[in-house]
Amino acid sequence: MGIQYFMTPKQKYLFDLRGYLHLENALTAQELSDTQKAIERLVQSPPDELPPGIGHGGEGFSNGFSADKSLEALTLHPVTWPIIKELTANKPRFNRGSLVVNTHHRREMTPLHCAGEGFRWTRRYDVKNRQIFTNDIVVFFYFTDVYPGDGGLVVLPGSHKRAFERPGNLFFPNPENPDAALHPALVNVTPKAGDVVIITEMLTHGVLVWKPQNRDRRFLILRYKTHFFQDERGLRDAFPPEVMARLSPETKALAAYAEPWEEKDIVKHDGVTLT
Ligand SMILES: O=C(O)CCC(=O)C(=O)O
Ligand SMILES: [Fe+2]
């Protein structure tokens, strides 16, 4: 089967120009309320009662996507799925899904970073025959609102096509000062609950200190590579056995390794419902 084109001309233009997309209201009201409730249950649950295979360290719940079917279903969400298929040339592999509850207690920012900095040549962003390809995609589903001035994700639009090494401290000469004005080349992305942000991990990005004391920033990080990508998870299962055991067959198919010339059955479906 040839590749079908799903991204709108506007999405293609913006993703290629900036290295990310911010899609508003990606979740239905029902999806948003189901996922918000599931996350609240996870947050309230004592550490020894977390579902097997979910670890809570720092501000993250590793494998948090597998805590509830409403969260697991986001791996194949109708808004993001066609875009993920297109960006990976129909060869996606889902291989990581953490949930984050970011609060003001975390006082330091996450410095700017991106895939492909330094010696790593394995991550790519390319455009050929009017098609965008990238083998490292991160999808952020938001369950709470972010407003300008709150903090959170900052990106350097266009940096996924950089040709030179980023000079250290160029954008944050004084990273200890959370009140410093943002460098004009950076954009603080401010999604609202139900929005989704899709980036290529080639994009330079970081995280500002979260300022509100009465609100947190809750979001799911879903990572996709090509299904033949070799990283430390390589040919083995992307998730621990106790997580694999409760995943739906569709999610397992999405997380499966395949050879470069193969095409997984799961990509033949536009809308995938978990069974
Ligand atoms: O906290 C965030 O918004 C971004 C985290 C991050 O850099 C990543 O997941 O790659
Ligand atoms: Fe990152």
Image (tube, rainbow, N blue to C red):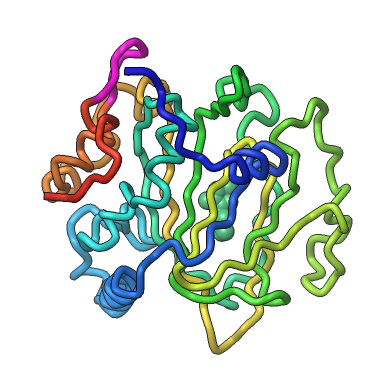
* 196 displayed left or right of 119: left
Instruction: Report x, y in % for residue 248.
Output: 15, 46
On screen, 65 above or below 217?
A: above
Q: Seen from this angle, which residue lies furthest bottom?
A: 214
Q: Residue at x 63, y 68 (%)?
A: 190
Residue farthest top in this picture: 261
Task: Name the magenta segment's main secondary structure.
Answer: loop
Q: Is residue 107 magenta?
A: no
Where is residue 109, by image quadrant? bottom right
Query: Which residues fall within the magenta stretch?
Result: 257-264
Looking at the picture, how far across and down is residue 173, in whole percent? 88, 56
Q: Residue 243 placed where, x, y %? A: 19, 48
Where is 132 relative to 21, above or below? above
Q: Is residue 136 above or below residue 181?
A: above
Task: Report the image quarter containing ligand 1.
Answer: bottom right
- The quadrant of the picture occupied by the N terminus is top left
Image side of residue 4 versus residue 254, left or right: right
Name the residue at the front extreme.
Answer: 9
Q: Residue at x 48, y 75 (%)?
A: 144
Residue placed most toward the observer, 154 or 12? 12
Tell me residue 35's x, y (percent).
31, 69
* Of residues 60 and 74, the one drawn nearer to the viewer in this rendering: 74
